[in-house]
Image: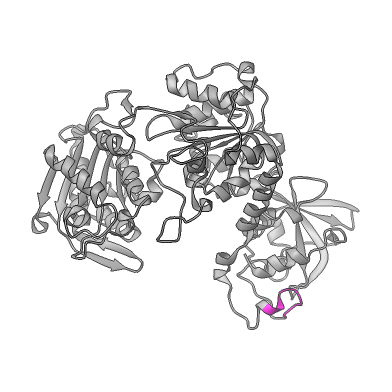
Amino acid sequence: MSLLFEKAVAAFDADSASLAARSDAGPSDAAFDVPTTTVTEFAAAHAELAHPDRNEWTRLPLHEPDSAALTGEYVVYSEGLTDEGMFVYYDADADSRKRIFREAFEASSLCAQIRFWHSDFVPEERASVGSFLAPKRRGYGAILLLNPVPFDREREAIDSVESRSSLADALTGRRRLTFGSDRAATSSTHDVELNQEQQEAVEHALLADDVCCIHGPPGTGKTRTLVEIVRRAAQSGRSVLVCADSNQAVDNLVVGASTESEADERSLHAYAQHGAAEFVLARRNYRRSSRSLVRDAYGTTRPEDADVIASTNGSAAALPPRFDLVVMDEATQATYTSACVPLSKGETLVLAGDHRQLPPYSASDSPPESAGGLSIFEHVYAEGGVYEGVGVQLRTQYRMHRDVVHFPNRRFYGRTLRNGRDVSAVEGLDALRGFHVVGEERRAGNSYVNETEARLVTYLASEVVSDASNGVGPGDIGVITPYSAQVDVIRDSLRERVSGGGRITVDTVDSFQGSERDAVFLSLVRSNEAGRVGFMGRRPDGPRRLNVALARAGKHCSVVANWNVFRGRDADHECTDLYDDFHSFLDDTGRLKRVEPEFIPV
């Protein structure tokens, strides 16, 4: 968003500004094609633009037609009234407020008076507001990098947490966690198929007076457990905020694998107003969802009408100040500071995640030096946390073949996982295979490519797809790699050489967390004489990425690498012992094959 907009918000006088009055706000003579969705989303993130009479209304300051100078007027925007959003101004002829849809507003003369709040538009005339920002006419496409809104939200949330002594004491370990709430008694079990640990996690969450942690390793039914917690909390009359760090994680809770015709019973969608109607669910910023089902089903539900609201951590800043229960999924991917945004709004907090998987994103090559860079889950539950081990670990996994889960269970989970069902391997293949191939890495911008590994992965995937008897189609296969450039190379290769290859999911490790496939092929890419493996050899996130990649597979997992680089005597990284252990496991059990590059079919 434009820095002119940030400056305008600071200069906007909410007490003296008035609703824009027009006799005619019809189509404008000049069509500017303003991206109003971006403007309204950023405006909604500023608490100072909230309308004093209606929580769901946001005031959009107007500027002069040809400059960024404020007019002292505003229009009102409301997301919740319709699927498209609604704008309000004062119709002077009718002497009443008038509402128009987004499409009509974008064609109106009023829309032209918010265009400079978007970085695509720069005024010719420099107004007093933000004039120092525009010495010459030029674009401001990179200005999003300087957006202060997320940091302002976090600072305000931290202040809010500090002002609530009971919450601050609970999050800093200054008082014992207690589980004496009577709310559990006012609800009954819905999902009778939960196992013992899942039931225990639900009871702990409902009994918690302050904070409850649920450690959910891959395939242990964490999402299903959280859905049961939300159902029972809603049944007992509690207001619930469900949140996660990313829109993808939020949508996984909201709709899961649901389709237009069939609801996923492990999702909230199955029990909300479009399913069993146990509660009313709203999705904050539903337009940010990549799922059409979310946009279609939850675009018209106003937050104030909902029993349960789903939101990203950051977007929770614009929600009401108090919820009886806040349920945060993927809490291991949210920093302590970002987590404070939703947590500042909850009476009771349920944190769910797996601190053996991906940590919060960091632009630095080094581990965080302060608690602010750690996840909220690690701060509370993990080794060295203020309540180390105080929570419930789910221990029965249902996703992976016993051979696939064996190494992650031993190396990352201290042999605490058990197998809840007998998962069969892909017919004709061992469940776990390793391949040693000495390819050549190539730098591609800030990423890396290994075309030899790409060819081998393509060949291995084609073998699975071509065998119709194994029941594994292209949509059941995933290819994972640490590097985005390798993603592009493998994706193109699969589309060109494998029947239905375009339906095979190819993505980075980070993007694959939370997903699963029957068959997974992992390309580790790095192959050089210096023994450098990049962030895959950096603690703590290198081992966690390996764990995430292995745990995406259900029936089969193949790992392709130059093992000399990852575990050999020339290896130059912090995780040599990890990859040496994994290599030895594959080799000692007869699962490691050596491949000469020239023998890989083209």
Write down the quadrant of residue 15 in the picture: bottom right
Residue that appears at 9% across and 59% down = 598
Residue 172 higher or lower than 441, as above or below: above
Query: Furthest residue to the bottom?
Result: 136
Write down the quadrant of residue 146 in the picture: bottom right
User: Is residue 498 at all visible to an observer of this figure?
Assistant: yes
Residue that appears at 20% across and 52% down = 567
Q: Position of residue 375 (x, y in %)?
A: 49, 46
Q: Is 20 left, or right, of 344 in this rendering?
A: right
Q: Position of residue 465 (x, y in %)?
A: 22, 41
Name the one closer to the observer, 34 or 316: 316
Question: The N terminus lies in which quarter of the figure?
Answer: bottom right
Q: Is 187 left, or right, of 573 in this rendering?
A: right
Q: Position of residue 36 (x, y in %)?
A: 65, 59
Residue that appears at 66% across and 44% down = 161
Magenta span contains residue 66? no
